[in-house]
Image: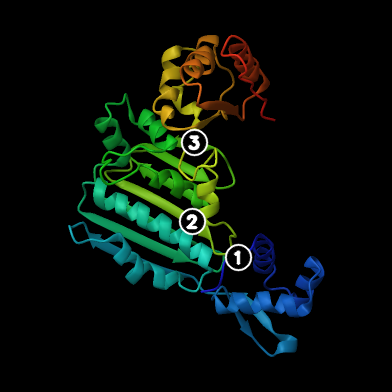
């Protein structure tokens, strides 16, 4: 295990992995990044220590290649004595123990949160875990044979359908067992890993770290019972759990008080977002946050009543909550600005380019 990767180190590492077969690699690294040959060799040695690459030959003619892929599968019976942290320590961490500390911390958070969800919420009998580690990244899948996460949320909160369950889940702070869970696990896990996905029933939720967007796909056919969680993290990211947590904290607080709402999930089929009832669906439970970013990606237009309900009515009733549109086109921003003009004094919006 090495220390935390810095952003500059992440760039160098990715260059090395893309050019691993080129002769005179240390010299190319030195020239590319304006660093000494000694510094370039330190990067190469560290990647060898971590098991990402393998070296052969003497110093002057040394050659490098990517390390072999590691694959393992595990199966666990869900029982009172099944402990996610014990599974992490005995089965999962040993397979990634040579990765940088910040990457291991991301995996610790993500794996234990998702595995614990399967234990506490799935109502299933078994959990299957698959792990695949290459020189570039690692992937983990966690599959249970329970009732299915979106179906359970729909029934527990008496929602219209699983699409609405997905909308509520994407906001964060949603849990069927508030005594044991804060409802933050999926929200933050989906933002810590590079790629995150949940498949359950006919609904697929996915998030990419490089994007603000949460989006969904209807699976081509029923996936069967249970829930499948997919996680992928680069072995060379400079991201940290602390950095991700801080992105969703505003006002000098260290709490989870900022969320992003994928507005498109409030729309069905070709229907446009025009009604107050649609707006209320978007606004459900957002009073638990201090700042709410409404993500309009995938939405072409909104109606006056929809905008008025959010940016005038709700805003005037909740003056301590900041609501801002992001990824909105000029037409939506015009409707937003019109609603602001008739709203509370002093509330100003800004267009998202």
Name the element at disc 1.
Answer: loop
The local secondary structure at tag 3 comes to strand
Per the rendering, the mark at residue 232 is: 2
Q: Residue at x 39, y 57 (%)?
A: 111
Residue 176: image location, x then y, percent: 27, 38
Q: Residue reaching furthest bottom? A: 58
Q: Is residue 196 above or below residue 75?
A: above
Q: Nearer the viewer, residue 13 or 244?
A: 244
Residue depth check, mark 2 versus mark 3: number of the one nearer the observer = 3
Label 2 – label 1 distance at C-alpha: 17 Å
Name the mark on residue 259. 3
Where does residue 166 sit, x and y in percent of width and height? Answer: 39, 34
Q: Are marks 2 and 3 in contact (CB under 8 Å)?
A: no
Residue found at the very far front of the displayed protein: 252
Query: How far is the residue under mark 2 from the one under mark 3?
Result: 22 Å
Packing grade of label 1 (10 A; few <14, some 14-19, many >=20) is some
Question: In this rendering, does residue 219 appear at all?
Answer: no
| Mark seen at residue 5 | 1
Between 193 and 101, the one lying in front of the other is 101
Q: Are marks 2 and 1 in contact (CB under 8 Å)?
A: no
Asked if residue 49 is positioned above or below residue 133 in the image, the reply reads: below
């Amino acid at each position: 295990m090495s220390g935390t990767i810095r952003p500059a180190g992440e760039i160098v590492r990715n260059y090395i992995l893309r050019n691993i077969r080129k002769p005179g690699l240390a010299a190319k690294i030195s020239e590319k990044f304006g660093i000494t040959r000694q510094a370039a060799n330190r990067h190469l040695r560290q990647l060898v220590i971590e098991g990402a690459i393998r070296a052969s030959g003497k110093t002057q003619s040394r050659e490098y290649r990517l390390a072999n892929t590691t694959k393992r599968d595990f199966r666990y019976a869900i029982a009172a004595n099944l402990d996610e942290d014990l599974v992490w320590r005995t089965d999962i961490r040993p397979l990634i123990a040579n990765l940088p500390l910040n990457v291991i911390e991301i995996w610790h958070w993500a794996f234990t949160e998702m595995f614990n969800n399967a234990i506490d919420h799935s109502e299933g009998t078994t959990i299957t875990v698959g792990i695949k580690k290459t020189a570039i990244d690692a992937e983990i899948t966690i599959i249970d044979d329970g009732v299915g996460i979106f179906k359970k949320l729909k029934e527990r909160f008496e929602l219209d359908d699983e699409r609405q369950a997905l909308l509520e889940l994407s906001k964060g702070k949603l849990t069927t067992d508030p005594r044991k869970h804060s409802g933050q696990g999926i929200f933050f896990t989906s933002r810590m890993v590079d790629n995150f996905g949940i498949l359950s029933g006919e609904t697929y939720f996915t998030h990419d770290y490089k994007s603000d967007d949460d989006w969904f796909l209807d699976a081509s056919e029923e996936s069967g019972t249970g829930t499948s969680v997919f996680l992928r993290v680069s072995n060379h990211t400079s991201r940290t759990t602390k950095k991700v947590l801080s992105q969703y904290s505003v006002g000098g607080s260290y709490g989870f008080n900022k969320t992003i709402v994928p507005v498109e999930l409030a729309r069905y089929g070709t229907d446009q977002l025009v009604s107050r009832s649609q707006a209320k669906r978007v606004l459900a439970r957002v009073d638990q946050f201090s700042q709410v970013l409404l993500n309009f990606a995938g939405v072409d237009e909104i109606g006056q009543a929809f905008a008025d309900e959010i940016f005038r009515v709700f805003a005037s009733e909740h003056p301590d909550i900041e609501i801002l549109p992001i990824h909105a086109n000029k037409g939506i921003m015009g409707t937003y600005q019109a609603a602001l003009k008739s709203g509370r004094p002093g509330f100003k919006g800004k267009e998202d380019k």
